[in-house]
Amino acid sequence: MGKCSKGYFQFETRQDGLYLTVYPPSEGEAPAEAGEALFYIEKKNIYGCDIAEFNEAFKKGATRQTTVKVSEERAFPVSEFGNYTMSYDNMVMEAVFYPPFVGAHELTKEEIKKDIAALGVVNGISEEAIELFLKEKRYFETYVVARGTKPREGSDGSIEYMFNTQLKPTPKMNDDGTVDFHTLENVNHIKAGDVVAVLHPEDKGDNGVDLFGRAVMPRRVKRAVFRYGRNLEVSEDKLKLISKVNGHVTLENDKIFVSDVMEIVDVDTSTGDIDYDGSIVIKGNVLAGFSVKASGDVSVSGIVEGATIIAGGNITFNRGVQGMNKAVIKAGGNIVSKFIESAKSVEAGGDIEADSILHSKMSARGAVKASGRNGLIVGGEVRSISLVEAKNIGNEMGTSTVVAVGIDPGAKRRVDELKVSLQEMGNNKIQLNQIMTALRKKQETDGSLSAEKRELQQKTMRNLILLEKDLTEQKNELEMLRKQLGEDVNARVKVSGNIYVGVKLIFGDQNYFIKEKCSYCYYMKEKADIKWHTL
């Protein structure tokens, strides 16, 4: 038997009884313990041993080889053996080996494997650990002789949000130390087609195998699913959530919402300026100095002070505009308001309608109507291409009020300018095309162009592209102005109440001053004169 470097012991059966020899350890190793010997005799049913002699032998054997007689009875020699234990989950088997009686049989690799297999182990037997023991012969030490295959743990599915889920509006600090409450990042803007969330599927992991060859399941994982409202769709691979509209995205609990209508209580320092690709509904007021811009409609339930409101669609003010001579209102469609007072500029691509229009400058491609109970247009300048209609225009105090209908004289001048410009660009286009034709013919004849000619060809092509773009834009502008000029023929000012002295009417490039109060009438241009008619 190979010598064990640790302290160890051996029993020996002699003619006169059972003897115990305790061997001291090599330097730095641990001595043998009496408890191991007691386990040994109990495990192998060896009886009649003198425990006092045991203890004495292990005390002396810690430093020198000591042999003592521990029993008068002769025991049957015990071969080298291992004591095997298995973990509670049947994934690990450990073995502690014990020395044989002097002259008894020592274990082989195959015998140890058979002992392990006899306990039902069919998976994970470690030949390396067995071979290590046979090489070292370190008794009373734990060897892991079999280890099951651990399951590969998976991971829960998750949702990755492609927008800021923790928006905290924070004012900007300017270089001069002042605070800018207008620019606050408080909206997650998105475009149609944007991915708002990505689903990372759960990983179920892989089964393991215990020592008995049975499957060991990994822990259960959670599956992730998109939870969302309208205006969203899931991609074909089910892994992306995509917006169907321009607008903004929010997360409420774990549900994603996309809307092309933004709802706000007030526009003030808590929101900053609003610039939104969609429609905006403001339930409260818009304070002076702030701006609201939307590609869609804008609706305000409260008062608009000296603010800027710009919409690609319609604008509706349920209460009205108190402009402070600062308000700028611009709509691609119609503007409807309870009243408009002291507005710096009001422009509409469609109609403007309000109960009262006071001391404001406004223009509309459609009609301007002061309808409702008051129906007032007093002060300022009101312009429409087709119709200005009110109950009363001006007042008894003769407040200066300008009402203009038809095309602005500047628009007529612009038509003349466009005609000249289009003629010049047409001539330039002919010349550029002639150059391109000549260069193509030379290339076909010579097979190639010189570097100088190629540069000329590229420059000419660029100029043609830019010229074509300018031609298209100016043609569209000319067509629009011509349509307006056609509408100019029927332009009129209609009064269902009174029009007062102090009102100036403008029809194109002609002015008409009201010299006396008139009632229930309308004004229009007939040939070169402005005529008055009763309703």
Image: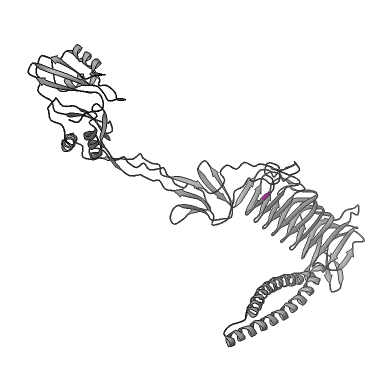
Colouring scheme, one of rainbow, by chain, secondary structure, one colour? one colour
Magenta stretch: residue 520 in it?
no
Residue name at image x 84 percent, y 72 percent:
526
Q: Main secondary structure of the magenta part?
A: loop
**Relative image position of residue 244 (x, y in whole percent):** 54, 56
Compared to 109, does 54 lie above or below? above
Most extreme residue toward the top is 52
**Relative image position of residue 47 (x, y in whole percent):** 13, 16
Q: Would you say 58 lies left or right of 478 here?
A: left
Depth order, front residue of 218/99 = 99
Which image quadrant for residue 22? top left
Q: Quadrant location of the N terminus?
A: top left
Residue range highlighted in magenta: 270-274
Most extreme residue toward the bottom is 445
**Relative image position of residue 4 (x, y in whole percent):** 23, 28
Depth order, front residue of 308/488 = 308
Q: Would you say 152 lies left or right of 124 here?
A: right
Instruction: Inspect this view and state whether residue 535 appears.
Output: no
Residue name at image x 71 percent, y 54 percent:
310
Residue name at image x 86 percent, y 63 percent:
505
